[in-house]
Image (cartoon, rainbow, N blue to C red):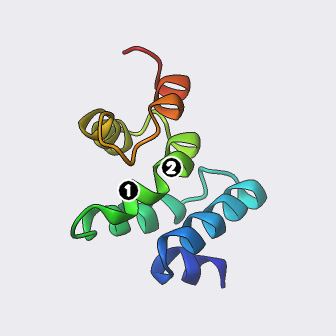
Amino acid sequence: MLRDIVRGAYVFESSAALAVLVEKEGRDTPDLWPLIETRIVNDEGGHYWTLAHEVLLQIWPENPLIRQLAKATVYDEDISITVFMRLMGPN
């Protein structure tokens, strides 16, 4: 059920369900990243990243796609630069 929410619910519900799954099963559970990667890649307009970036950065700060998106959007008005700097550092 939580995976269905991550897969298809609105961003806030999806990211909350993702946080619960990561807490229960760990971030390296094989099917979690592919669910998120699909949402990000298929997200026209970037709304998923914009609204879920804090959760995604906390879970996968070293992931190349997450890092690329964070660096590309760090100065956008909807992005939390505080979270970005805390989790990714100055690099």
Marking on residue 49: 1
Question: Which corner quadrant holds the N terminus?
Answer: bottom right
Vertical position of residue 27 compared to residue 89: above or below = below
Q: Which element type, helix, strand or loop, lies under badge 2?
A: helix
Vertical position of residue 12 compared to residue 75: above or below = below
- CB atoms of marks 2 and 1 within 8 Å: yes
Q: Nearer the viewer, mark 2 or mark 1?
A: 1
The residue that appears at 57% across and 80% down in the rendered structure is 5
Q: Is residue 9 left or right of residue 40?
A: right
Going by the numbered disc 1, the residue's amino acid type is Trp
Marking on residue 56: 2
The residue that appears at 55% across and 71% down in the rendered structure is 14
Q: Residue 42 location in percent, x, y?
A: 26, 70
Question: Which corner quadrant holds the C terminus?
Answer: top left
Q: Residues within 10 Å of mark 1 (few under 14, many from 20)?
A: many
Going by the numbered disc 2, the residue's amino acid type is Leu
Q: Residue 6 location in percent, x, y?
A: 54, 73
> Where, by quadrant of the figure, is residue 40 drawn?
bottom left
Q: Residue 12 location in percent, x, y?
A: 55, 69
The residue that appears at 41% across and 14% down in the rendered structure is 90
Q: In this view, which residue lies farthest toward the front? A: 77
Q: In this view, which residue lies farthest toward the top? A: 90
Give the mark nearest the N terminus, 2 or 1: 1
Q: Which element type, helix, strand or loop, lies under badge 1?
A: helix
Vertical position of residue 66 compared to residue 14: above or below = above
Q: CA distance from mark 2 to mark 1?
A: 8 Å
Q: Residue 32 location in percent, x, y?
A: 53, 63
Q: Is residue 42 left or right of residue 57?
A: left
